[in-house]
Image: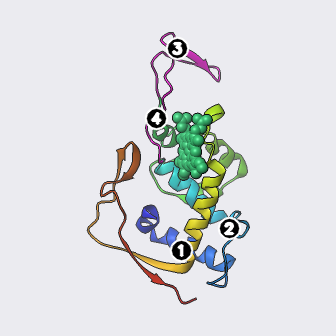
Amino acid sequence: MILLFEHPDCLHRLVQELDTALPAIDEPITHSKVMDLPYLNAVLYESLRLRTPISTALPRITPPEGAVLCNYFVPGGVNIALYAISTSTSNYDRPKVFDPDRWLVSPELVSEMKKAHMAFSMGPRVCIGKNLAWLKMRMTLASLLRTFTFELVPGQNLQPTLRSVLRPMDSKLLVTASKRAV
Ligand code: HEM
């Protein structure tokens, strides 16, 4: 929501997509109605990339003698933060820019970028709730934006800061919400 407030053009585009997919405002929202909406998914991928909730390094440290991972030698004692992977220029073009459209390019490029999308980690200890989280994120964002118009309460410090998880400096997001008529 913070990134969408900071990029009103993206917010507008997402609301338009949701209004088209869910023409009746009181229509119950099911996952099947929103799961394949391209812009909704692009916004979520991009938000998870740029505001990776668990941004710090996971408790994985290479042993003192180092380790070979995917044919690369990694020296001993190395621990890599997920945020560093999500915002590295080796993985993403203009990595600090919020640009949902980067997820709407060719399937080959998107598939490469997904290999560096680490919000849920990867491998044998990948988040077990990943699919449930995707379902809840899609349905929550879709129902909020389909039902309400939001305005940001001014004077808040919403810069991301790291306190075990990534969160806004003021720790909360204050908005006013008005119910939409149609
Ligand atoms: C946006 C939401 C979520 C994010 C960003 C997230 C992220 C993560 C990450 C990065 C890990 C790896 C931790 C590690 O390896 O040390 C993890 C593990 C885990 N997550 Fe999530 N998670 C989310 C939602 C959920 C939900 C909804 C559930 C359960 C319903 C869940 C349950 C778990 C469990 C049980 C593990 C441990 C898996 C294991 O070690 O085998 N997560 N999550």
- Circles 2 and 3, Cβ within 8 Å, touching? The answer is no
Q: Looking at the picture, how far across and down is residue 52, in whole percent?
A: 48, 47
How far apart marks 1 and 3 lie (CA) works out to: 48 Å
Residue beneath label 1, please?
A: 145
Task: Name the kind of residue labelled 1 in the image.
Answer: Leu
In the figure, 68 relative to 31: above or below?
A: above
Q: Residue at x 66, y 55 (%)?
A: 105
Task: Name the kind of residue labelled 4 in the image.
Answer: Ala
Q: Is residue 63 magenta?
A: yes
Q: Earlier in the sequence, mark 4 or mark 2?
A: 2
How far apart marks 1 and 4 lie (CA) works out to: 32 Å
Q: Residues within 10 Å of mark 4 (few under 14, many from 20)?
A: some
Q: Quadrant of residue 103?
A: bottom right
Q: Residue furthest left?
A: 155
Residue beneath label 2, please?
A: 34
Residue beneath label 4, please?
A: 81
Q: Earlier in the sequence, mark 4 or mark 3?
A: 3
Q: Looking at the picture, how far across and down is residue 149, in whole percent?
A: 47, 79
Residue toward you, 48 or 103: 48
Q: Looking at the picture, how far across and down is residue 157, in whole percent?
A: 29, 60
